[in-house]
Amino acid sequence: MGDNLSEALKKLKIISTDSTADSLEECLDCLLQALAQNNMETSEKIQKSGVLQVLASLLMPQSSCTAKVANIIAEVARNEFMRNPCVDAGLIPPLVQLLNCKDQEVLLHTGRALGNICYDSHTLQSQLINMGVIPTLVKLLGVHCQNAALTEMCLVAFGNLAELDSSKEQFAYTNIAEELVKLFKKQIEHDKKEMIFEVLAPLAENDVIKLQLVEAGLVECLLEIVQKTVDSDKEDDIAELKTASDLMVLLLLGDESMQKLFEGGKGSVFQRVLSWIPSNSHQLQLAGALAIANFARNDGNCIHMVDNGIVQKLMDLLDRHVEDGNVTVQHAALSALRNLAIPVVNKAKMLSAGVAEAVLKFLRSEMPPVQFKLLGTLRMLIDAQAEAAEHLGKNVKLVERLVEWCETKDHAGVMGESNRLLSALIRHSKSKDVIRTIVQSGGIKHLVTMATSEHVIMQNEALVALALIAALDLVTAEKDLENAQLVQILHRLLSDDRSAPEIKYNSMVLICALIGSGEAGPVWVPSRFTRACPQEKIPTGGDTPRDTHKDSDDSPEAPQEDVESAEN
């Protein structure tokens, strides 16, 4: 075989352009046979012979040998060491051109060749995207959907390309959503569905494609899978249930797709998701809570859901996970309650329903994502709710835990939220009893430190709380304020040109109170610091706690979140 291969390589270099098709095919067959027997060794010989450049010239749509040439390139490019030589030989442009031909065998081997050459190289994959392969491949999927091998080739290519941000915009201008949903509906085998899922997940990160997928009917497919697999113990069914419910939550991260599925709270999708919360499946409980959290991203939706009893469902769910509960479910349910508590009209209703007490059951949690959401939920609930703020502010166990978490330097989000809740308890209660509880628990030093935060809103909240302390009960807090070097910090804030006007003003208010010039004057809280906290989006995640980028940030203007479940 070695002699035959060497002879074939020599012939190829000589006769590639002026030989008969038969003699050329003999050479190509010899190469394919050698590659089948020993791919690596044969590939090395092909590289050394200089035949790769010859192969580039043979990639012509009208040639009968083109499929074999593309197949040889695909086999050679399975070896990592051959990929750069294939690029250097100029094989990518003619291969990309071949994607426009109609011969299915040529298309299959061309797709394989491009996939192998560009495997694991974002640079080369970006080059393919810039050369316009995405609309071409989407068109191929539609035209050749009956060809299983070609369909699989397209899906593998989509899976690789969809990981790149630059691909999403191009995909959004095609009918990829429609084609994938159409293909998905035909699938029976788990492996085939899984392959489509692997394409859908990265594509669904794009808001435009999210909406396209919703409009193409993907949600109905996902709900059907959930219904079929929820009671199954089969490994494949459990995997499908997780993938389908996770993807459902991902679709809700887009504002337009979320609102379309909410349908004023009367949509069938929203109603089905509600039924997941009392489910016995942890995966469905998690997905249901995350879905509610994401539906709760604007005031109208939040008010509708609270008025229609969602709070009790979430509290019942939390109650099932107090002792040795599932951390991801705890995190998701707290995320939902946090978002629901943002509209002013919901706060009193949720407090009356016992949400604060339900949340406080998780005060013992050692999981930072749960701690973070717990703190955020309480802070939302007591905003402008004096009675609730006073009740919580006199809770010694809560205040002591807050003081402990104020020192959690390895989780900035928990530390920031603890400081903000301490301040909020004072600001909203204006209670001497609350101030004394915080003083006795050692919280004053943290409020003073908070006044030096890099975030203006946190500085402002701290100064307002400290001014109230000075006005209401300076005697109790005086020693702690002195030990925390409050005066020196105020001097620094006033002399710093970078300090915002409201920071300087409230520093002066605090100084007036401290030097005993009567009651503290009016506190300046600019409107941008009093607006409602926006709800956050909550993406799905895995099975163990992790911080989302928002959770791990002590950025004080916590958004109305896209909520993500906790995972490592």
Image (tube, grey):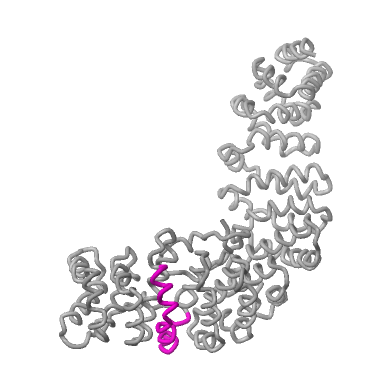
Please state which of residues 51 and 414 is positioned toward the viewer in this rendering.
414
Query: Residue 15 occupies which quadrant of the picture?
Result: top right
Residue at (22% x, 85% y) in the render? 521
Please state which of residues 99 and 553 is positioned toward the viewer in this rendering.
553
Q: Quadrant of the C terminus?
A: bottom right
Residue at (64% x, 32% y) in the render? 92
Please state which of residues 380 and 207 is positioned toward the viewer in this rendering.
380
Query: Residue 445 occupies which quadrant of the picture?
Result: bottom left
Number of marks in the rendered image = 0
Q: Position of residue 335 (x, y in %)?
A: 55, 71
Please state which of residues 21 and 336 is positioned toward the viewer in this rendering.
336
Left or right of residue 526, residue 62 in this image: right
Q: Position of residue 65 (x, y in %)?
A: 79, 25
Left or right of residue 560, residue 524 in this image: left
Residue at (20% x, 65% y) in the render? 492
Residue 383 is one of the magenta-drawn residues: yes
Q: Which residues are magenta?
A: 381-405
Tell me if residue 249 comes above or below residue 32 in the rendering.
below
Q: Position of residue 175 (x, y in %)?
A: 69, 55
Query: Residue 193 occupies which quadrant of the picture?
Result: bottom right
Residue 474 is one of the magenta-drawn residues: no
Tell me if residue 10 comes above or below residue 239 in the rendering.
above
Secondary structure character of the magenta stretch overall: helix
Left or right of residue 188, residue 555 in this image: left
Left or right of residue 461, residue 94 in this image: right
Q: Quadrant of the N terminus?
A: top right
Q: Position of residue 444 (x, y in %)?
A: 30, 74
